[in-house]
Image (cartoon, rainbow, N blue to C red):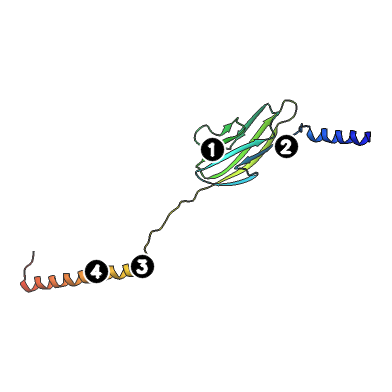
Amino acid sequence: MVKSKFSLILILFILLLPSASSEVTITANSKENLVFVNSGENVTFNSLGIENSTSILWDFGRDINGPETRYSEQQNITHIVHASGRYNVTFTASYSDTQNVVKELILIVNYEENYQDNIVHNEALFFAIAGSELIMSAILGYWTQQIRKEKVYL
């Protein structure tokens, strides 16, 4: 009975102890590794497992949202990304007693122009335009004939 209590207490102690070497993960819009977004959307970058770090640094590869937005030292950051293309995002967490932890993800920003072609495909409209052209041609022909009969020229 004493052995089973000791084993149970030891297991509970191990399970309840916070993990000393927690795994660092980074996400963009709650997705890891490869993230696709449309131009003009909010993108939220999160870093988890960095509780014991001395410093952190996001490197977005280029200015992500205007001038001087390539780097950030915030744990969680939100940007509206307008420029389409590929962003190689690198996150570095520094620790005093161990090596730096470097994580990467790729952000692909897609730009699609919403062009709507407003061409009316309507037979009734075609026949109305064609009919009005025929009527105008007939009127023009009539007045041309009248001018020739009178031999009056401008």
Q: Are marks 3 and 2 in contact (CB under 8 Å)?
A: no
Which residue in the structure is indicated by mark 3? 122
Q: Tell me which amino acid carries mark 3.
A: Asn
Which residue in the structure is indicated by mark 1? 79
Q: Give the mark nearest the N terminus, 1 or 2.
A: 2
Q: Give the mark nearest the N terminus, 3 or 2.
A: 2
Spatial CA distance of label 3 from label 2 is 63 Å
Q: Tell me which amino acid carries mark 4.
A: Ser
Q: Are marks 1 and 3 in contact (CB under 8 Å)?
A: no
Crowd class of label 4 (few under 14; some 14 to 19; many from 20; radius 10 Å): few
Q: Give the mark nearest the N terminus, 4 or 1.
A: 1
Q: Give the mark nearest the N terminus, 4 or 3.
A: 3
Crowd class of label 2 (few under 14; some 14 to 19; many from 20; radius 10 Å): few
| Label 4 SS | helix
At a point 78% along the width and 32% down the height, the residue shown is 17
Could you tell me residue 75's position as x and y percent? 62, 32
Q: Tell me which amino acid carries mark 2.
A: Glu
Q: Residue furthest front?
A: 1
The answer to which quarter of the image holds residue 142 is bottom left
Q: Which mark is residue 132?
A: 4
Q: Nearer the viewer, residue 20 or 4?
A: 4
At a point 24% along the width and 69% down the height, the residue shown is 133
Spatial CA distance of label 1 from label 2 is 25 Å
| Label 1 SS | strand
Q: Are marks 1 and 2 in contact (CB under 8 Å)?
A: no
Count the labels in the image.
Answer: 4
| Label 2 SS | loop
